[in-house]
Image (cartoon, rainbow, N blue to C red):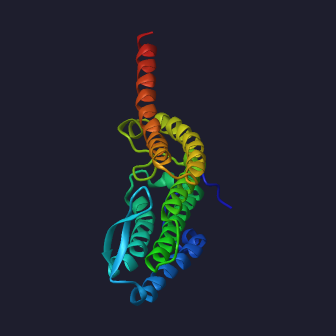
Amino acid sequence: MPREDAAQDYTLSWGSLKPDWPLWLVLGGMLAAAFILYPLLPERVPVHWNWRGEVDGYGTRLQGAFTAPLLALGIYLLMLVTPLIDPRRRNYARFSGAYRLLRWGFVLFMAGIYGVWMAAALGYPVDIGLAVKMGISLLFLTAGNVMGQVRHNYFVGIRTPWTLASEEVWRRTHRLAGRVWVLGSLICLLLAFFQGLWSEITFFAVTTLMVLVPVVFSFLCYRSLEAKGSGEQRG
């Protein structure tokens, strides 16, 4: 069995795609559900909720039924195809397992949100706010657990000017991001069960920090390595 870090190219073959077959069932199920639910949905479907969980935006029945399934399918296909045009496509073979888990996380996140969304549109008493916050938290938790395995590339991961300019900065930033995202997602999971403005603000603050901390760290890390390199050259 080939090792993940072996030097091989990223390809789309039956062998590489076969482990994704459960995701094809999920995506197919979402599309089938869209056709089944379309005639059952009201003409105006809720598409946005405020922090209190109150509907403050509506869309058409067509939007409600098909937006999430088509978006999930489109992004899943993009995740398969974009590595083919990445100048660092060989690196994807070094984190193929992590990349597959990211695809799983995204598709299952979209499927869960779609299910809750359609239940709310059909009049079932669901807590859409809780579902969204839990979904976001679990998605960050999944990504955080594999972020340290993601190798240098131009499409997946924390792509700042400094991580793209240095593989060492990339490696250190993604290791830090993994720890920050796991910790932050666990905090967000707890916050998801609390209601009120304070919990919404805290949830937003934590998720914002989860994004900003790795970005700022990548800049500082790059500057530090650059200064160290300049000092060694002068010495």
Quadrant assignment for the C terminus: top left
Which residue is painted at 53% across and 63% down in the image?
A: 131
Give the vertical position of 112 relative to 233 (above or below).
below
Horizontal and vertical percent position of residue 123: 47, 78
Which residue is painted at 53% across and 48% down in the image?
A: 150
Give the vertical position of 210 relative to 90 (above or below).
above
Q: Nearer the viewer, residue 55 or 40?
A: 55
Q: Is residue 190 left or right of residue 56?
A: right
- The total number of labels drawn is 0
Residue closest to the far right: 1
Q: Is residue 113 among the parts visible in the rendering?
A: yes
Horizontal and vertical percent position of residue 173: 50, 37
Q: Nearer the viewer, residue 131 or 228?
A: 131
Task: Tell me where residue 74 sits by quadrant.
Answer: bottom left
Q: Nearer the viewer, residue 94 or 104?
A: 104
Which residue is painted at 46% across and 15% down in the image?
A: 232
Which residue is painted at 50% across and 81% down in the image?
A: 28
Residue closest to the far top: 235
Quadrant assignment for the N terminus: bottom right
Task: Tell me where residue 51 sits by quadrant.
Answer: bottom left
Q: Is residue 94 among the parts visible in the rendering?
A: no
Give the vertical position of 66 relative to 136 (above or below).
below
Horizontal and vertical percent position of residue 105: 55, 61
